[in-house]
Amino acid sequence: MAKVATLITDMFEDVEFTEPRDALVEAGHEVVTIEKSAGNTIEGKQGEAKVTIDKAIDDVSPEDFDALLLPGGFSPDLLREDDRFVQFAKAFMDAKKPVFAICHGPQLLITAKTLEGRDATGYKSIKVDMEYAGAKYADKEVVVCQEQLVTSRQPDDIPAFNREMLNLLK
């Protein structure tokens, strides 16, 4: 089963982490949360989810993981201010490892300059940013690109996002 890194910090969109995490765990995969410091407790922007961070970014390597989950909310925008998180996400895209980004999750991929020529979607407010980054934006509930990148727009798309995420890990 896959070991899935999750880059996450405060103000993540609660269900965009909890529902994919639950689907992954239920399917037998391991989900590891990564932030600036292990042991930190972070909170979703809706106040519904609190998460204790498993690993600090300085204590992990992309080579330790099979796939990457990027939940939305304000978390991706906060994380992309720190090059360590940008380079971590870039390593998955460069290695063609599975990457699952929902809502604002693609913001880390924009900053990593890894969306050029890729089919993708994301929250409507980042559509233009994704297009400027070279992505071929599609307003669909889920887009799968090159059997590697799975993107979705918003919480309503989670069932389709989870389905394609799990299909890619089979």
Image (spheres, rainbow, N blue to C red):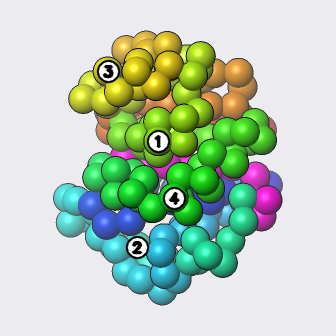
Q: Which residues are magenta?
A: 63-72
- Verify whether residue 24 appears in magenta: no
What is the distance, in whole Å, between disc 3 and disc 4 at their CAs? 22 Å
The mark lying in front, picked from 3 and 2, is: 3
Residue 2 screen position, x and y as percent: 75, 54
- Identify the mark nearer the N-term, 3 or 1: 1
Q: Residue at x 45, y 61 (%)?
A: 82
Residue bearing mark 4: 83
Q: How far across and down, in percent of the image, does residue 170 sit?
A: 77, 38
Q: Which residue is mark 3?
A: 128
Q: How many marks?
A: 4
Residue at (55, 62) in percent of width and height = 84
Select label 2 or label 4 by which is in front.
4
Distance (Cα) linking label 2 and label 4? 23 Å
SS at mark 2 in the image: strand
Dot 1: few (<14), some (14–19), or many (≥20) neighbours within 10 Å? Answer: many
Residue type at mark 3? Val
Up the image or down, 11 lies above or below 108; here it is below
Q: Give the residue number, with chain letter if any, for mark 2.
A: 51
